[in-house]
């Protein structure tokens, strides 16, 4: 499927249950394991792969075509001639997907055989739930199953929109929820999933599966793990946008100037964040206090400033906060 064809909207197919949202760039060494893992899924016959393939090499194309022959009728291969951000690629995939449920799956990660079925079952049985995530392991060698367990149930806060990228790399959601949350922000190159996950948490009800979903590969080559990644700067965009002040790293404030924080860019159009998050202005006003009470204190603490100095800073910050809120309301 060529680029111009990828702009069409996918027609829902009742035979399929889950569409995989996948972006690939220079993924030759990971594709065979990825395809093998897809075929090992317990509901593989009801799975569709929508893969946005950026600047594919001949060897990569051969791998995809061979797999397509084995998995006929289940693969949408979108060829992107010139590399683009994964957020733009994901938006293409979402538009093309024909299943009711969409699942994130990067080609360098591996899912457990029952993960898609486990997540889909939650969405089928609980109509009030719009997204599902769960435990996974961080591995440092392709194909490994041994690594640090990330336990989703041990969130540091009951408010999932305040807990960082809690949803992890294997979340699943209803395609229909995008009408409320919007789509991926195409301004972001490495933190678009984080941004989208926060809007999911602010718009819909989620659930955690009681099973392990997969293995996230961290060998410092991925967009969010390599040494020169923009992840810290773009994470700051997300945290400023949604008032997650206690997580802000003020060292990267200067890097935010080129982003349009109050707006999401999706399919080339600009949409206000306030139109995608219910009660957005009230949310930001409510969380504003944490900028002083938690965010700045944490920053000063990291800089090694002693608590005796923080007390007058808190008093000054509180007065300034009240003054700014008064101005905003006037």
Image: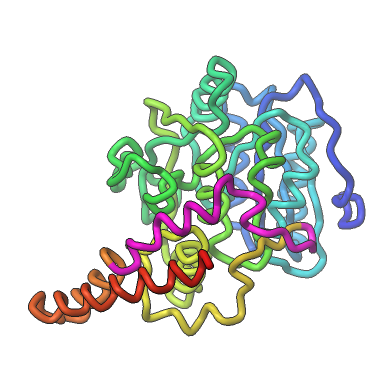
User: On the rendered structure, is 235 left or right of 43?
Assistant: left
User: In which quadrant of the rendered view does residue 85 lie?
Assistant: bottom right
The image shows residue 234 at horizontal and vertical percentages of: 51, 69
Q: As displayed, is residue 210 above or below residue 268? A: above
User: In which quadrant of the rendered view does residue 146 lie?
Assistant: top left
Give the residue drawn at x 59%, y 37%: 36
Magenta highlight on residue 277: yes
Outermost residue to the bottom: 254
Give the residue drawn at x 89%, y 46%: 8
Determine if residue 257 is in view.
yes
User: On the rendered structure, is 122 left or right of 184?
Assistant: left
The image shows residue 28 at horizontal and vertical percentages of: 63, 57
Give the residue drawn at x 71%, y 62%: 265
Determine if residue 222 is in view.
no
Outermost residue to the left: 308
Outermost residue to the right: 4
User: On the rendered structure, is 44 left or right of 208?
Assistant: right
User: On the rendered structure, is 127 left or right of 53?
Assistant: left
The image shows residue 241 at horizontal and vertical percentages of: 52, 63
Query: Which residues are the magenta region?
Result: 267-292
- Judging depth in this view, the residue of 113 and 207 nearest the camera is 207
The image shows residue 257 at horizontal and vertical percentages of: 56, 81
User: In which quadrant of the rendered view does residue 83 lie?
Assistant: bottom right
Q: As displayed, is residue 227 above or below residue 111? A: below
Q: Main secondary structure of the magenta part?
A: helix
- Judging depth in this view, the residue of 136 and 130 nearest the camera is 130
């Amino acid at each position: 499927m060529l680029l111009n064809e990828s702009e069409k909207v996918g027609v829902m197919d009742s035979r399929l249950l889950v569409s995989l949202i996948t972006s690939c760039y220079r993924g030759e060494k990971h594709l065979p394991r990825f395809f093998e893992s897809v075929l090992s899924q317990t509901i593989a016959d009801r799975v569709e792969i929508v893969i946005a393939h950026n600047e594919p090499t001949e060897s990569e194309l051969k791998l995809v075509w061979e797999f397509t022959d084995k998995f006929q009728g289940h693969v949408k291969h979108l060829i992107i001639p010139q590399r683009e951000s994964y957020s733009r690629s994901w938006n293409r995939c979402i538009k093309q997907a024909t299943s009711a449920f969409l699942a994130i799956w990067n080609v360098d990660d591996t899912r457990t055989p029952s993960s898609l079925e486990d997540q889909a079952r939650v969405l089928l049985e609980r109509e009030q739930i719009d997204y599902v995530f769960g435990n996974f392991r961080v591995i440092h060698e392709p194909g490994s199953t041994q690594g640090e367990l990330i336990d989703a149930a041990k969130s540091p806060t009951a408010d999932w929109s305040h807990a960082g990228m809690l949803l992890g790399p294997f979340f699943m959601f209803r395609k229909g929820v995008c009408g409320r949350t919007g789509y991926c922000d195409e301004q972001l190159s490495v933190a678009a999933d984080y941004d989208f996950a926060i809007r999911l948490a602010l718009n819909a009800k989620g659930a955690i599966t009681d099973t392990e979903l997969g293995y996230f590969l961290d060998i410092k080559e991925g967009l969010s793990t390599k040494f020169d990644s923009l992840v810290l700067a773009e994470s700051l965009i997300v945290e400023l946008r949604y008032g997650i002040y206690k997580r802000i790293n003020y060292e990267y404030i200067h890097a935010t100037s080129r982003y349009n924080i109050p707006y999401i860019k999706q399919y080339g159009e600009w949409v206000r964040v306030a139109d995608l998050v219910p009660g957005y202005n009230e949310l930001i006003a409510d969380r504003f206090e944490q900028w002083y009470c938690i965010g700045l204190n944490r920053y000063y603490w990291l800089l090694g400033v002693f608590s005796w100095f923080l007390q007058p800073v808190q008093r000054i910050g509180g007065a300034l906060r009240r003054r700014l809120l008064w101005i905003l309301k006037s």
